[in-house]
Image: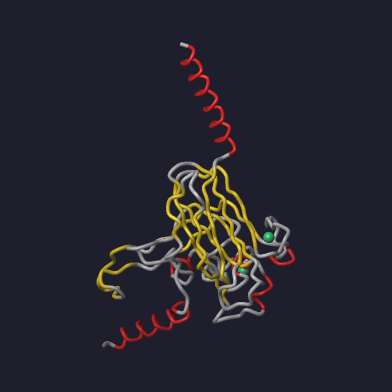
Amino acid sequence: MKSSTYIVLLLAAVWAAPSGLQAHISYSGRNFGALVVGSPAAGNLTQTVSSSFGWADATDDDWGDSHRGRFFRFTLETSAAVMITVERNANGTGVAGTFLPAFSLFAGLAQGSPEALAHDSAALSVASRPAGTEGSFRALTDWSIGNDPTYVTAGDPTSGILFEARLAPFTYLGHAADGTSANFGLVPGINGDGHADGFVTATFHGLAPGHYSLFLGGANYGAQATETGPTYPTYGVNVTVQAVPEPSTWAMLLAGGALAGAALRRKARR
Ligand SMILES: [Ca+2]
Ligand SMILES: [Ca+2]
């Protein structure tokens, strides 16, 4: 091979090595599908989260690394409220009984097949954020992340581009965090539930039909000082999501029931 090609490949290999240790953003095994109001909660009890600090670390000024958490997805075909609950379990390599979960909900999805998956070190990701940031993930506001181009022949840029690299936008809708500022830090505006007990829940109201991403990570900001990688402890979580009626929907149902009842009574009188 030409030496210039060799250098390009060598550089590519060096560039890819650190991120190659880490997964790209994927929802594999973490897709709750379409949520329907009135259906039972959907549960995922088998996932683990990398590190105990990933969510909290994405609340600060230098953003966060999307690899230090897990992405889940669900779809709504009608407007709904969605209740999300996360509780630690005994799975994972980290110390059982210590994980403090937090999550953020976003409208939008990361890139998926047949596109290349998104990752923090994609050229487009790096170019789209300030220098010195730890990654693309932001827990308390909108953010976006890029992928790499998909080439006609995998891994061969000279073969032509099948799908251009692009940024996938995530629109921030809200969050919930286990515990208090004693664990998630002093960034203003974090909704702690006040009890650092490994359990956190929140209901998001007025969600429009569409696709949603749930980012789940650890709420222990200070743990990044001791969990330094490159191999991070993992922590098991039980995640449940459920589409629930809006309070206004209940009112409408009750009103509708009353109207239907009145109609039946009118019919019965005839
Ligand atoms: Ca950070
Ligand atoms: Ca709690």
Q: Left or right of 165: which side holds 57?
A: right
Q: Position of residue 261 (x, y in %)?
A: 52, 23
Determine the residue located farthest toward the top in the rendered image.
270
Image x and y of residue 60, in percent: 64, 65
**38 vs 17, nearest the viewer:** 38
The structure residue drawn at horizontal position 29% and vertical position 69%, both measured from the top left corner, is 151
Residue 96 sits in quarter: bottom right
Where is residue 94 drawn, in percent x and y? 60, 77
Q: Where is residue 122, by image quadrant?
A: bottom left
Q: Is residue 130 above or below residue 193?
A: below
Q: Tell me the colour scheme of the image.
A: secondary structure
Figure quadrant of the N terminus: bottom left
Q: Position of residue 250 (x, y in %)?
A: 57, 35
Query: Where on the image, by quarter, is ligand 1?
Result: bottom right
The foreground one among 259 and 73 is: 259
Position of 222 with respect to 147 (left or right) is right
Q: Which residue sits at x=68%, y=55%? A: 191
Q: Residue 119's quadrant in the figure?
A: bottom left
In this picture, residue 37 sits left or right of residue 174: left
| Mark count | 0
Q: Residue at x 45, y 66 (%)?
A: 25
